[in-house]
Image (cartoon, coloured by chain):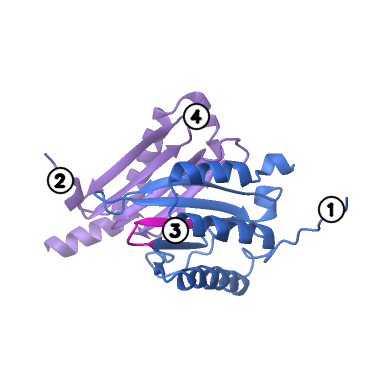
Chain colours: A blue, B purple
């Protein structure tokens, strides 16, 4: 069977500010479109500037989105192929107590970006923020679908 | 009882995985200094077993560099440094600034205190 060629998107995103900003905008556009399609408002919740006003361009996270009514968030951490060594996508969950009485339930996705991982990430975001499935079920889906670096190596 | 919620500067450093959930927190009236941030990182390290630390050794170095190089980090800030080689996808070290500012130079804190109380 012929192997499908996987194309890494924006491979030099950490080297070039312009490319980084294009990449960030493309994530933003994709996530906002997802929200609009389902008539749900999504907004960033992680500050992307340091105390002196300089923008963080480390892709940790490249983007964040909060669905306020359910208090669920998503952070996406993007790696270079060199950092990750091989293609992968996975995710974990975190409770982020910006408000101690009402912590944000976060799904944190980490990936190396290709068309395939982007589609999978958007599918997971839809399940978590829009369909609002339980964490346990989401975890099972991630376990089944994730591709870890050592598996691809 | 001390009301942590009313403190202006709050955050935590956290070592996580399926089997590990250890953290150190701060909640105070003035921004957390780099020195105190590094002390908290040392405190977190001391809470981990040898294996737990070894699984996150590179991540500890990254966070140490982050704190040392910081010009001050404002909330809401969250960075997760995952051990991507680990089979447990949640093995990681987190840095979170929930409110206020953290990892500032101690001279900046002195300047703020001087300004407030002059």
Q: Are marks 2 and 3 on the same chain?
A: no
Chain of the residue displaying label 1: A
For the residue carrying disc 1, how many other residues have a C-alpha within 10 Å: few (<14), some (14-19), or many (20+)? few
Chain of the residue displaying label 2: B
Of callouts 2 and 4, the N-terminal one: 2
Range of residues picked out in magenta: A67-76
Q: Residue furthest right?
A: A1
Look at the numbered discs 1 and 2 and tell me whether their residues touch, using CB distance below 8 Å.
no
Residue B113 in the image, given as x and y percentages of width and height: 19, 58
In the structure shown, which secondary structural element does the residue marked by tag 3 occupy? helix
Residue at numbered disc 4: B52
Q: In the depicted view, which residue is nearer to us: B78 or B111?
A: B78
Q: Are marks 2 and 4 on the same chain?
A: yes
Q: Are marks 3 and 4 on the same chain?
A: no
The residue shown at (42%, 51%) is: A106
Q: Residue furthest top?
A: B50
Mark 2 to mark 3 CA distance (whole Å): 32 Å
């Amino acid at each position: 069977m012929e192997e499908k060629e996987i194309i890494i998107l924006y491979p030099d995103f950490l080297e070039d500010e312009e490319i980084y900003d294009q990449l960030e905008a493309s994530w933003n556009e994709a996530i906002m479109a997802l929200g609009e399609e389902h008539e749900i408002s999504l907004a960033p919740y992680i500050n992307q500037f340091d105390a002196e006003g300089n923008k963080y361009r480390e892709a940790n996270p490249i983007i964040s989105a909060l669905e306020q009514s359910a208090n669920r968030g998503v952070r996406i951490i993007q790696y270079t192929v060199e950092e990750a060594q091989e293609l992968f996508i996975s995710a974990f969950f975190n409770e982020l107590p910006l408000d101690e009485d009402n912590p944000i339930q976060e799904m944190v996705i980490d990936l190396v970006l290709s068309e395939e991982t982007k589609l999978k990430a958007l599918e997971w975001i839809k399940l978590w923020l829009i369909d609002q499935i339980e964490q346990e079920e989401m975890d099972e889906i991630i376990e089944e679908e994730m591709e870890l670096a050592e598996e691809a190596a | 009882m001390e009301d942590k919620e009313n403190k202006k500067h709050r955050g935590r450093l956290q070592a996580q995985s399926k089997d590990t959930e250890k953290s150190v927190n701060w909640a105070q009236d003035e921004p957390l200094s780099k020195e105190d941030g590094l002390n908290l990182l040392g405190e977190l390290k001391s809470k981990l077993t040898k294996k737990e630390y070894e699984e996150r050794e590179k991540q500890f170095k990254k966070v140490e560099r982050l704190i040392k190089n910081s010009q001050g980090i404002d909330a809401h800030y969250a960075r997760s440094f995952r051990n991507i080689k680990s089979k447990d996808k949640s093995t990681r070290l987190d840095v979170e600034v929930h409110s206020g500012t953290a990892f500032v130079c101690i001279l900046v804190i002195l300047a703020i205190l001087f300004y407030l109380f002059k």
